[in-house]
Image (spheres, grey):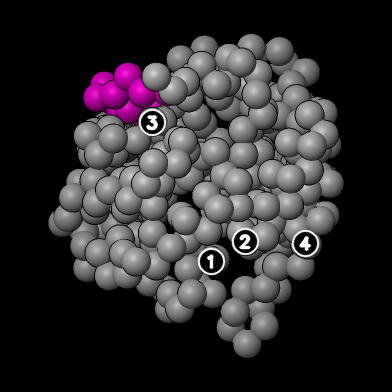
Amino acid sequence: MTATFLERLQSREILIADGATGTRYQNMGLALGVPPEEWVFDEPSKVVGLHRAFIDAGSDIIITDTFGGTRLRLRDSKYADRAPELNRRAVELAREAADGHPVFIAGSMGPTGALCEPLGDLTYTAAVETFAEQAAALTEGGVALLLLETFFALDEARAAIEGIKQVSTLPLVVSFSYDQGTRTMMGHTPTQVAKALAPLGLAAIGANCGKTLGDMEKIIAEIAALKTGLPIWAKPNAGLPRMVDDVATYDVTPAAMAEYAIRYVQAGAQIVGGCCGSTAEHVAAIARSVKRET
Ligand SMILES: [Zn+2]
């Protein structure tokens, strides 16, 4: 019997997550403006191919192509009315890529793209419902854990957690994006987020995307200092994008990312990977250096 995700976390082993999904697809031909989740139905072999590239690079965790897979987020997609099916199929593709490799499949769940009342028109109840529907489909598909990623608003995260807990007992990781440096778009600090969410029954907490590798180190240190007892997740961007002929280009090298990955672990992170702009080469460099140094 192989160890579960929670057992691997409890063993204090450092786990390697994967790299970018959306920006990699853009390099693989995803047109601007097309939701990456549409590739679950339209380009399944490319979805499997990217998962495989990250597995070959040393990822212990691969993340489904379902970041924008809530019914609410998919509302402008041609697959708007097939949200649960799309989520289940995305898990199938990840399982096909894993093909016997001992990797954990994380079901990605991102924000709905709408702001909660009173700032926007998203009601708390509608948010709870859409995340519950997605979590149920991902759980049914057979993921090992659920991952709320790139969140920036506490109210939406609370609604998502409530919806998830209604339908799933899987381990839940919550990761916010501090894209203003060390604050989210809504102005939340890592301390505010961790204090608010750590008591809600999470398996790990952390940060992804964001601005710079140095900011991520500060965020990890800030969360670690709170001693919540939760493992910390760190999945930074390969820097901020530069547009070159309509293609987002990221300048942070695999070597630079690997160097920072070690610093994140030293600061208290237990799961490291890369977000936007991170290729299989970035993940391979992170895996090599982290497994060597720790
Ligand atoms: Zn990102």
What residue would you read off at disc 1?
24
Q: Secondary structure at mark 1?
A: helix
How dense is the environment of label 1, judged by Cα within 10 Å: few (below 14), some, or many (20 and up)? some
Q: Residue at x 39, y 52 (%)?
A: 97
CA separation in Å, label 1 and label 4: 15 Å
Q: Residue at x 74, y 45 (%)?
A: 288
State how many labels appear: 4
Check disc 2 and give the amino acid type.
Answer: Thr
* Residue 132 position in % (x across, y down): 26, 33
Q: Which residues are magenta?
A: 160-171
Q: Is residue 55 magenta?
A: no
Tell me the CA gap for discs 3 and 4.
30 Å
Real-space CA distance between mark 1 and mark 3, rounded to the nearest whole angstrom? 23 Å
The crowding category of the residue bearing disc 3, from other C-alpha atoms within 10 Å (few below 14, some 14 to 19, many at least 20), is some
Q: Nearer the viewer, residue 190 or 265?
A: 265
Whole-percent x, y for residue 262 in the image: 80, 38
Instruction: Check disc 3 and report the residue beneath it.
Output: 144
- Which residue was labeled with disc 2? 279
Tell me whether the residue at label 2 lies in contact with that at label 4, contact meaning CB atoms closer than 8 angstroms.
no
Of the two numbered discs 1 and 4 on the same chain, state the one appearing first in sequence. 1
> Is residue 179 at all visible to an observer of this figure?
no
